[in-house]
Amino acid sequence: MKIIFLFLFVFLISEIVGFSVPQPKGIKSSNRSLVYTYDINGSFYSKFLFTDLNFQLPFTCENGSSIRTCTSYVDEEIAKNLHGSMSSCVIDEDGSELCGSFTPNTKYYPNPIIQGEFKPPTKGSHTIIKGYYLVLGITYYLTIIPNMKVPFVGFFYEESFDATNLILDYKGGCGEKTFQWPNGFKYSFNHSNPTIDKISSDNSSLVAIGSNFCSNSNDVNIFIDGIQVDKINLISIDHELFEVRYTQQYCKSIYVNIVSGGLESNKIKFEFKPLPLKINSIPKVKGGLITITGERLSSQINNSSIIVKIGNHQCKNIISSQHEITCNLDPVQTGSNDDSIGLHVNVSINGIVNDNILLFSFDVPFIYDFILPQGQVKLIGDCLGTNESTQIYIDDIQQLNLTININDKQTTLLFTPLNQIKNSKLYIIVNGKKSNVIQIDSSFFVKLSPLSPSVLGQIVNITLYNVNILNHNNLPTLTFMDNTTIKGIDNLNSNEYSNHTYSFEIPIGCGRNGISISIGNQTTHSELYYELPIITSCSINNDQIIRCFGNFTNYFNFYENGKINILFSNSIDEIYLPTNSIDFKIDSFSFQLNKKYKTNQVYFNVCNELLPIINIEYNSTIQTPQPTIINTLKPQLNSSSEQEIKQNKTNSNSYSSNENMSNKQKNEKIPSEGVKIQYNIILIILPIISFLAHNFLTSQLF
């Protein structure tokens, strides 16, 4: 038996050795046929055998004068089976055929035909590459130059394996890559284009969500409005997310895109929307100044369009900065309670509208701060009510028999406590609405003398009350809102340091100033306001020129520095007449009256303190109107100044004014009755003189 097997083995070897290996001269592959050409006298493949599938790919050959052309018909169904273990049938020069003994040399494999684009995701996945002749023979992977192996998904020796839709277990990459097949054929590809789906921001960075961003910072470039982001500002990068440092303090739109692996993404628009976070309340029937605080409340674009709507009410006279918008809301006389509570606040800047929810309600009392001027308590806030409607509670006990003084805009409330308030909780109730609760202590307070120093500066004596014994050896410090400090000097007026007076050198200044006074570990907040000019009289002529008289010598420098102007104000509009429109002299000033306003709506504004110019008249029956001298104007420290209210809301050391007036300013009246009396006396005396003269002449003639 052994001899028989040995004989057969020797026979087969001799048969194989007798056949020459085919050496094709050319190969052409398409999705319709596979064509090999040979020398006419050489051996050639008559079939490719895929033994795992029991599938054959036969060739039909035609002989030319010197070339033999062998063609196999191919379609998609045939191409699906061209995989797995592979051998061939070879016809030798003498026409004899031998099958199963020859595996074609890989260099004679047909070149793959790639259908469509192969663009895998950068993060990798099971990805399909489509085409013909993608895998022949026993192989488990494709190779990316230089030596990255990309394995197939599935078993190539099974019938279900589709060689025209080759599923690759691609692990990911970035940029251009190249496949190389065993026959040397190369196919270059890039990855899917990056796509940005969403942008978000946390005020310090931008975060983009999408796909195909790559994962190596060296492979990417990020652009914001066409400007490349410095790689140092790239916080993180992954295939589906990147984050860059970026802050934007203004409301605006930007465009973001990324170039990864040489491929550019879409450009996505992102809006840095206005972010209103807080809004004050105002009295519904009075209207008033609305202050909105938040982020990105202005734009870098000149002449920006800014619209503020509160419910159905539109705000007017809008002034905006990065963190604050102020505007005026008109009084609302009618409407149901539904139009008073929970109104949505919408801020639009150049068409970009906030998407957060901020609600506004009318007539909600709120206390921002308090100060202790001259031993009284002044609350600063919004919707503080009226003298009659507001109730004050200290430690939940209503304070009865208090004299309350609330300004017209309901932004300040002044009262004198019946007893010292020590570490107590204070709130108010206005028409059944309770305010927030503040912690208050009025035991340590100060009094100033004089209360209104000269604008040229002067010594002011300040008496400190209820100084802690541990602080008796200290000297007090006065601090202005701009952090300017002045050290007090002991007047040595007594040895009682619990209540003691110190002198302070107050510098040149004007207007009302919030101050704090500290000694040791005790601090109190008060206010200091410089004296205002005294306007002795005003007149108006037929051209609507108002001229006011007085002594303004000390205020000329403030005029030159733009701190003096004219305010036209009513419940709807406010207009400031610029400084250069005022003819200002040391003894008078004059300006053109705006015809839209009445004379009782005109104010002389000195460092944001308002003196009303009122009761200006002239006799319209006179053909050539002459100036009419009127009552002397009494300067008023007007707390309705919108600038002051704005300060109250943004600085705990800012103050409003309404109650105090300078003792130096008194009413004067130019007498006019005396002229009438003198005229009547003349009328009486003239007939008497005429009668006496007539008698005298008669006696002389006769």
Image: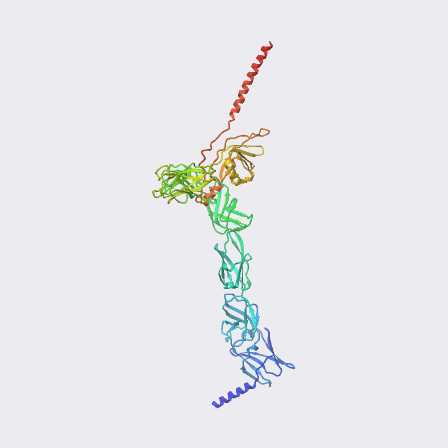
The location of residue 507, given as percent across then percent down, is: 46, 40
Q: Is residue 432 visible?
A: no
Give coordinates of residue 475: x percent, y percent: 38, 42
Vertical order, 587 against 233 (above or below): above
Which residue shows up at 55% across the image and 77% down it? 106
Using the image as rendered, state which of residue 42 and residue 546 is in the foreground. 546
Q: In the figure, residue 476 lies in which quadrant?
A: top left
Describe the colour scheme in one phrase.
Answer: rainbow
Asked if residue 13 is positioned above or below residue 514 in the image, the reply reads below
Q: Is residue 392 visible?
A: yes
Residue 109's x, y, as percent?
56, 76
Q: Is residue 202 above or below residue 528?
A: below
| Furthest-top residue in this view | 702
Measured along the vertical axis of the image, is residue 490 above or below residue 58? above
Residue lying at the far right in this picture: please name it. 65
Locate the C terminus by quadrant: top right
Foreground pick, 459 / 48 = 459
Q: Nearer the viewer, residue 231 or 42?
A: 231
Percent x, y of residue 609 = 48, 38
